[in-house]
């Protein structure tokens, strides 16, 4: 019977800011980028990915109060057309 060995991956967490734009709003959200020695690296944690989804959905509904729970919110104003 073959032996199954657990893969030991070295993983670093790097803080990053992700920007999400929906309409006239932009959210700046702090996340941790997970960097490992595998082919999927770098990636976000499941929790951070869900938070980014929540922010995007809140901004789509123009619910800046909910979006602000996750990070800084900006209103974008075009300078020229």
Image (spheres, grey):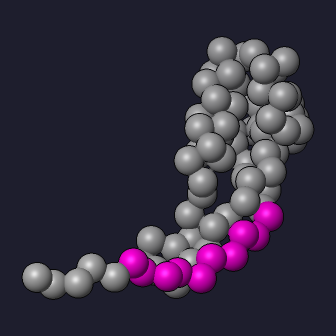
Residue 22 seen anywhere in this rendered image of the structure: no
Residue 63 as seen in the image, left or right of residue 56: right
* Residue 60 location, quadrant: top right
Residue at image coords 34%, 82%: 5
Which region is colored magenta?
A: 6-15
Residue 64 inside the magenta-drawn segment: no
Residue 47 as seen in the image, left or right of residue 62: left
Q: Residue furthest left?
A: 1
Residue at image coords 69%, 42%: 20
Residue 13 at x, y = what percent? Answer: 72, 69
Q: In the picture, which quadrant includes the C terminus?
A: top right
Residue at image coords 85%, 28%: 68
Residue 28 at x, y = what percent? Answer: 81, 45
Q: In the picture, which quadrant includes the N terminus?
A: bottom left
Residue 11 inside the magenta-drawn segment: yes
Residue at image coords 70%, 25%: 59
Q: Nearer the viewer, residue 68 or 39?
A: 39
Q: Residue furthest front?
A: 1
- In the picture shown, does residue 55 fall above or below 42? above
Q: How many marks?
A: 0
Residue 3 at x, y = what percent? Answer: 23, 84
Residue 29 at x, y = what percent? Answer: 79, 45
* Residue 25 location, quadrant: top right
- In the picture shown, does residue 75 fall above or below 14? above
């Amino acid at each position: 019977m073959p032996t199954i060995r657990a893969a030991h991956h070295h993983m670093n967490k790097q803080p990053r800011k992700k920007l999400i734009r929906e309409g006239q709003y932009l959210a700046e959200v702090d996340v941790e980028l997970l960097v490992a020695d595998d082919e999927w690296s770098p990636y976000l944690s499941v929790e951070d990915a869900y938070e980014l989804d929540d922010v995007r959905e809140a901004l789509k509904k123009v619910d800046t109060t909910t979006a602000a729970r996750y990070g800084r919110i900006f209103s974008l104003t075009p300078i020229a057309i």
